[in-house]
Amino acid sequence: MADHPQVRWALVVLSFGSGATDAFAFLALGGVFTANMTGNLVLAGLVGRPEYLDTLLTATLAVVAFVAAMYVGFRWTRTASPRPLLAAVGVVQAVVLALWIAVDGSAGLALTCTMITLSAIAMGWHTVLGRRMSSRAGLTTTFVTGTLTSVMQDLAEGRREAQPLRLVSIAALVLGSFAGALVLLGLPRIGPVLPVVAAIAAWLLLRRAGAPRAEE
């Protein structure tokens, strides 16, 4: 699928949305990630930090929701177009935005846990979409370690075809986190708006591409 220009752009947009999502989660939802599960596993082990038990709870919720969402997403897209799953990502991100606006940026622990869980579900599905849509390009839209590994492996083995997409995707994730932080600084009431915009934009790009069926 990644050979189609619109699909490549959709992957870049999804990476941007993941960066924005993690920026919002880390800065506004108690210092955990909803896309970067490696970071959450490390945070869960950092005993002695201030409010460690809250961090342990929210990081664990994020990991469980992310993993469960990936399982559901991979089952969902075994033989189906990824576009309905991407639409579901947009809906879940919109719910997070609506909850954030409703509490005007001052959520208690219960609602924070709810938003973390929903955001992690969306990011688990993001990861599924990245794997399905990038085919064998070795690209992930929610974390860069796997993509960097693919970049360096292909450089070492003399393969170049997927490198531009991977590098642009990494840059988009960093730019997304920067943009997400800026939105929180300048327009905190709509802090998680960029992930919603990114999901809609990626869905429209897939629609233009005709949303080929997922590759197994």
Image: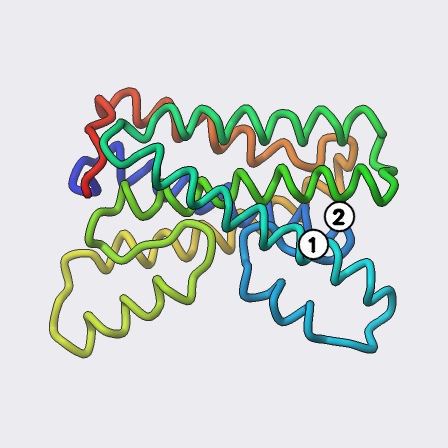
> Quick one: quadrant of the C terminus?
top left
Going by the numbered disc 2, the residue's amino acid type is: Leu
Left or right: residue 123 compared with residue 113:
left
Horizontal and vertical percent for residue 41?
Answer: 60, 67
Left or right: residue 104 compared with residue 13:
right
Q: Which residue is mark 2?
A: 29
Horizontal and vertical percent for residue 80?
Answer: 26, 28
Q: Residue at x 32, y 38 (%)?
A: 9
Q: Are marks 2 and 1 in contact (CB under 8 Å)?
A: yes
Q: Residue 27, relative to residue 155: is it above or below?
A: above
> Quick one: quadrant of the N terminus?
top left
Mark 1 lies on a secondary structure that is: helix
Horizontal and vertical percent for residue 13?
Answer: 41, 39
Horizontal and vertical percent for residue 195?
Answer: 56, 36
Q: Which mark is residue 154?
A: none
Closer to the camera in the image, 190 or 139: 139
Q: Residue at x 75, y 35 (%)?
A: 187
Going by the numbered disc 1, the residue's amino acid type is: Phe
Closer to the camera in the image, 183 or 104: 104
Q: Which residue is mark 1?
A: 26
